[in-house]
Image (cartoon, rainbow, N blue to C red):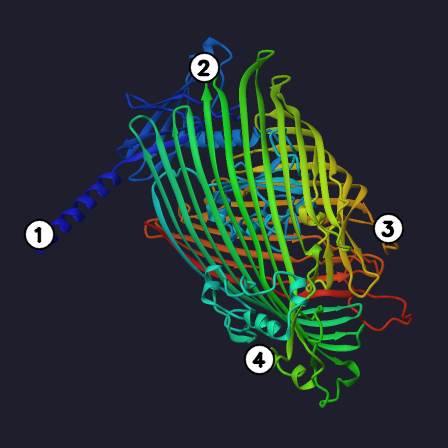
Amino acid sequence: MKYLLKRSALLVLLTVLVTVAFAQTGKITGKVTDKKTGETLIGLSVKLDGSAKGASTDVSGNYALTGLAPGKYTIVFSYIGYQPKRITDVDVQNGKPAIVNVVMEDAPSQRLAEVVITATARQESVNSLYAAQKNRAVISDGISSDQITRSPDKSTGEVLKRVSGTTIQDNKFVIVRGLGDRYNNARLDNASLPSTEANRKAFSFDIVPSNLVDNIVISKTATPDLPGDFAGGSVQIITRDIPAQNFFTVSLGAGYNSQSTFKDFYYGPRYLSDYFAFNTERQLPTTGFPKNTSQTLSLTQEQSTAAIKKLPGVWNIGNSLAAPSQNHQLSLGRVKDFNNGGRFGVIASLTYRNSQTTVPDAERTYLFYDYDDRVNQFSTAIGALANLSYTKGKNKFSFKNLYNRILEDRFTYRVGSDFTRSSDLQYYAFDMLQKGLLKTSVEGEHTLGANKNRFTWNLAYSNVINNQPDQRKIGYQRTITDRDNPEVPYLASVLSINKENNRLFSDLKENIYNGGLNYQVPLKISSQPATLKLGAGTQYRTRDFAARLLGSVLNGFDEDVQTRPINTLYGKDLVNANYYRLDEITSLTDSYDANSLTSFGYAMLDNKLANKLRVVWGLRAENFNLKLNSFRTSGEPLNVERNDLDLLPSANFTYALTPKSNLRASYYRTLARPEFTELAPFAYYDYEVLAVRQGNENLKSTNIDNADLRYELYPGTGQVFSVSAFYKHFNNAIEPSIDDVNSTPTISYYNTKQAVNYGAELEFRHTLGFLKDNSESLNNTTIYVNGAYIKSKVNNPANAGYLRDNRPMVGQSPYTINAGLQYNAFQNALNLSVLYNRIGKRITSVGGQRLENVWENPRNVLDFQANYRVIKGKGQIKLNVSDILNNQSLFYFDYDGNGKYTPLQSAPADPNIRQDEVFSRFKRGVDASLSFSYNF
């Protein structure tokens, strides 16, 4: 025993000594780029001045000088054809990397090649930032990991609303330049991301935690090496790669919502697995249960009773006080520098989020409806990220993995009146949705030959699930004339399968395979540097979707049964006594399978027409093949096929007016393709919008011609001023349509012959130091404002009797405003941020023959964050307060046409004159959260 204790004590002592030894060394890392082109420089020599110690930049332009004692160093950078650069005052501290990014200037003559440029580390960091901002090939906007850290945003969806010209719908779907999710695409680490929604082309950005992101860039113009299926923006999310230093961080957080936390929270069946985003208790039975409608309708009463018993049978409504939200994360980073110049890095992370929120009084008062909804939502999200990278010399390999799973369980209780049926209503909806994304990719980056040709490749696989297990809906009715008669009860609508008595089970599975090759060759054209880039690749998607609509139907009218409360309405005593039979109305249209193959090739030239004029131009070709198999309502097989070849030219001009400013102009052609769901005949009733949604097999792809103009100025580090204008012309634009002649509207999609979208954007970011010289507090305070003014026009289907002949595009706001004030103190230990967001009114649901468009009213959103580093910088306390003003969310019908919501003052003299009506009105409450993280 004593021997064991001695061995253990010795092991601990050795561990401490090794840790201390490693802590007493530091390193210098960074990236080296060309000042004019922004390209990384490979194989460049990096040496410590006065020492033999040195390194070379790898295939990504990165370098690392390791094993350095604490102190100040001078580094010398040299490369053939470039002026040498000497960086002084590089401060290396214990166990902490000094990051020095450098830009190199080419030497037009041998005399200049011998002149050494000298700068301090701080000055060079500013220079590298200028170069990165000025040398982008396209018009783009983005947000860095530093800006993400200083915002109260927990997910990528929340972060994106800070980007100029960008708004977020439902807190997760991105709208760029007024164009909805259909006209945007998303990429994660150079691979296209699939749609995570069953009924729209949209990537739920809320499934990517913001602290796993290195940076986000939204390209608003196209180059041939970008996917061609966007018109608003191409969102590129880059997750963190090789860390600069080892770290292990634990973050724990809790949140409070002013109208939910510690208040009544109602819910349906709850299982322990729900807290981990997995629910297996509410799935459709797989054995001993009918497989389709035909089998269900042929069951005997005994067989029907046995089948009902196999269905999830918990109808109790639970009640508790809503718990505070939780947001926890473990993050690990490891980096190893080898003696042979190789470098290996790992970043891994586990994330957990849970919340219980309530909207206690969502009002719906329009047409024939007068409803009040109480919406309770339980949400859990788990996430995991594991990135591994190895780089040595001219080669880099990366293996990146992301997994996210979200469970949303919503219970809605609705009371009110439906005047089409002259009935008062009590309505219950139990709606669970499980979404998952698994993405894995392998990437390579290589430099070939003495000419520094660059070859990159990637292979990726993604799997998406969207599972809706046992969406239950049940309604009770009573005639309005009996409203004041206490002897007349509400009766459950259980005599048939209908909008108010059904159980929906749906399951979507999608697999996506991506592969791409890119080859880049440096050239000289008219003595000016140029780059030729060629590439090809493919994406193959498969999807299987199936839904079943069934339920328990009472064998005959029985007031005693129909007046039972919901927890005993389908009680075991009634089922065992054969009061119910299993019924089903699933049709052949309720399932489909589909696949698509998109193949592309491109050629792009990045060259200078003059010393200050740069053009990035070329051609991209995409061949798109789609097949979808389902059935028509008549029972005939439905086979939808598309085979399109699209040629997509683009040209991006950049003129360097001064060393700190650019003038940009662009033309490019892009497209938008219909999603599988939009082509499928599947129809389902959406109880939230009181309408049926259905696809249209005749949809065509949209072709879009785009033009942009932009002036940008970078006056200092992290500072920018830009103004942009853009114009977009759509042929066969895909837009929602509505047939609302009947009491239950049907929402579908159509191709409008043409549509236009145009506008202007402004962005300004600057420190306040210019207000007073030598003021430390003002120098540490940054103000930023970005905004957009946008207009669009779409013609509604002709000769269809619509109330409006034309309208703006769905989701397009006439203006967006983002503003913020950020303050840093105590050498960045304290960060304070105040952020403001507002969007103009926009259409969320299109109007038709009887209903006007549904408009979302503008809201003022004010957020605050305080971030303070403690325990020698290893700990961090973060306070977030979101939506401080808690403005009402209002969705309305603008029948008086005055461009705003006008509350009803009194009944109009003419009953044919309709006044504004409320589609939905509610508040979400103020969110406050406190978190603590510690880096071991």
Give the farthest residue toward the top: 110
Asked which secondary structure carries label 2, the reply is: loop
Asked which secondary structure carries label 3, the reply is: loop
Q: Amino acid at mark 1?
A: Tyr
Discs 1, 4 touching: Cβ within 8 Å:
no
Question: How far apart are the two marked residues, 2 and 4, measured between alpha carbons?
Answer: 82 Å
Q: What residue is shown at x 32% (from left), y 35% (from top)? A: 336
Quadrant of the image containing the N terminus: bottom left
Would you call the spot at circle 1 few (<14 residues within 10 Å), some (14-19), or many (20 or more)? few
Give me the disc on residue 3.
1
Q: Name the side, left or right, on which 596 lies relative to 477.
A: left
Residue corresponding to mark 4: 576
Vertical placement of 345 versus 808: above or below?
above
Q: Earlier in the sequence, mark 1 or mark 4?
A: 1
Would you call the spot at circle 2 few (<14 residues within 10 Å), some (14-19), or many (20 or more)? few
Question: How far apart are the two marked residues, 1 and 4, measured between alpha carbons?
Answer: 70 Å
Question: Where is residue 194, by image quadrant?
Answer: top right
Of badges 2 and 4, the one in the foreground is 4
Query: Residue 54, image x and y in percent?
Result: 32, 23
Give me the disc on residue 450.
2
- Comparing 282 with 426, the one in front is 282
Q: Amino acid at mark 3?
A: Asp
Query: Residue 211, image x and y in percent?
Result: 46, 48
Discs 4, 3 touching: Cβ within 8 Å:
no
Q: Amino acid at mark 4?
A: Asn
Residue corresponding to mark 3: 805
- Comparing 118 with 565, the one in front is 565
Q: How many marks?
A: 4
- Comparing 35 with 262, the one in front is 262
Would you call the spot at circle 4 few (<14 residues within 10 Å), some (14-19), or many (20 or more)? some
Question: Where is residue 47, by image quadrant?
Answer: top left
